[in-house]
Image (spheres, helix red, strand yellow):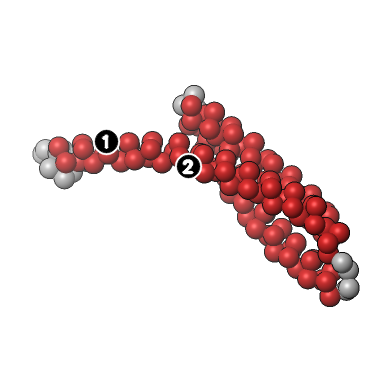
Amino acid sequence: MVETIVKEMIDLVNKMQNYILQDIEDIKQAKHAELLNRNDEKQSMIEKITLYKKRLNQEIVNELQNGVDINIYRDQVDNLEAELKKLYELNRKLAMIVQPIQQMYKDIVDEITDNNGGNFFNVKA
């Protein structure tokens, strides 16, 4: 069971890595709709990874309680950890791209608001 959970987690993590790489490319090419299309699926994948993590921890505890030497799973779990680290780094790279863009839009809105006396739209009736 541990092997199955680790494999499914690695599959999900690899898919997330690919999505983040696609996100980075879509940002470069200003394909904003493509980014939005993947968001729901990425959120679902994050939730699945979280559930798998809980199941994996429980399965490892069960194996320990049954006297199984869990070191037999060491390579698989190490591989999972390496893939999660790659995912973290890719996510960090994406954040480094998105954060300045977000700040730029915030600055533009703040400037327009300041120029209109604190209102985004200057409506005169």
**Residue at the spot of label 2:** 95
Mark 2 falls on what kind of element? helix
Q: Is residue 31 above or below residue 77?
A: above
Please, what is the three-letter code of the amino acid marked with disc 2?
Ala
User: For residue 5, what is the image quadrant?
Assistant: bottom right
Residue drawn at the location 57% of the way across and 43% of the way down: 89
Q: Between residues 70 and 57, which one lies in front from this camera angle?
A: 70
**Residue at the spot of label 1:** 108
Rate crowding at label 2 as few (under 14), some (14 to 19) or many (20 or more) other CA atoms within 10 Å: few
Residue 83 lies, in percent from the top left, at 68, 46
Residue drawn at the location 63% of the way across and 48% of the way down: 85
Please, what is the three-letter code of the amino acid marked with disc 1?
Ile
User: For residue 97, what is the image quadrant?
Assistant: top left
User: Which residue lies most toward the top here?
Assistant: 29
Residue drawn at the location 27% of the way across and 39% of the way down: 107
Q: CA distance from mark 1 to mark 2?
A: 20 Å
In the displayed structure image, the side of residue 49 where residue 24 appears, left or right: left
In what quadrant of the picture does the C terminus appear?
Answer: top left
Q: Between residues 62 and 32, which one lies in front from this camera angle?
A: 62
Rate crowding at label 1 as few (under 14), some (14 to 19) or many (20 or more) other CA atoms within 10 Å: few
In the displayed structure image, the side of residue 49 where residue 37 appears, left or right: left
Q: Between residues 48 and 10, which one lies in front from this camera angle?
A: 10
In the displayed structure image, the side of residue 80 where residue 107 appears, left or right: left
In what quadrant of the picture does the N terminus appear?
Answer: bottom right
The numbered mark at residue 60 is none
Q: Is residue 57 above or below residue 76?
A: below
In the displayed structure image, the side of residue 22 where residue 6 appears, left or right: right
From the viewer's perspective, is the residue at label 1 or at label 2 nearer? 2
